[in-house]
Image (cartoon, rainbow, N blue to C red):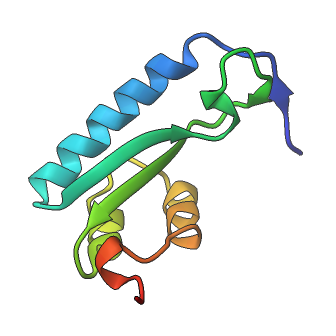
Amino acid sequence: MISVVDYDPSWPHRFDALRDEYAEALTAAAIQIVSIEHAGSTAVPGLAARQVIDCDIVVRGKNAMVQTILAAAGPTDDERASIGANAVPSHDEVPR
């Protein structure tokens, strides 16, 4: 069952902590970060949402998505599956 709750002002701070954790792990794994963004309904101030902090992580380089999943700092198996399911090609892998 999906549970939607009132906006929680701690969500931006939770994202900040996740962004820092992911950035540290990716940097340690020598993965070039393009951006880490707060996405989804928890990113919209005042909006009711599921209590899930969605992060869009954009990295550069061939096979960077696989490396990113392997280097991810602390996600659960379900979060890793979500990362993989939503993966898109890196900037270097997009056909032109």
What residue do we see at 33% from left, 47% from top? 35
Left or right of 5, for residue 53? left
Left or right of 24, for residue 18? right
Q: Residue furthest top?
A: 9
Q: Residue furthest right?
A: 1
Is 30 placed above or below 43 here? below
Residue 66: percent from left, percent from top: 33, 75
Residue 70: percent from left, percent from top: 30, 66
Which quarter of the rendered picture does the C terminus lie within? bottom left
Q: Quadrant of residue 16?
A: top left
Left or right of 88, for residue 49? right
Is 79 placed above or below 91 here? above
Closest to the observer: 36 or 79?
36
Is 57 placed above or below 24 here? below
Could you tell me how many numbered marks the image carries?
A: 0
Q: Quadrant of residue 6?
A: top right
What residue do we see at 26% from left, 71% from top? 67
Closest to the observer: 45 or 65?
45
Q: Residue furthest bottom?
A: 95
Which quarter of the rendered picture does the N terminus lie within? top right
Closest to the observer: 10 or 73?
10
Q: Residue furthest front?
A: 96
What residue do we see at 70% from left, 34% from top? 41
Residue 87: percent from left, percent from top: 50, 70
Left or right of 23, for residue 43? right
Is 75 placed above or below 15 here? below
Residue 53: percent from left, percent from top: 57, 36
What residue do we see at 28% from left, 80% from top? 63
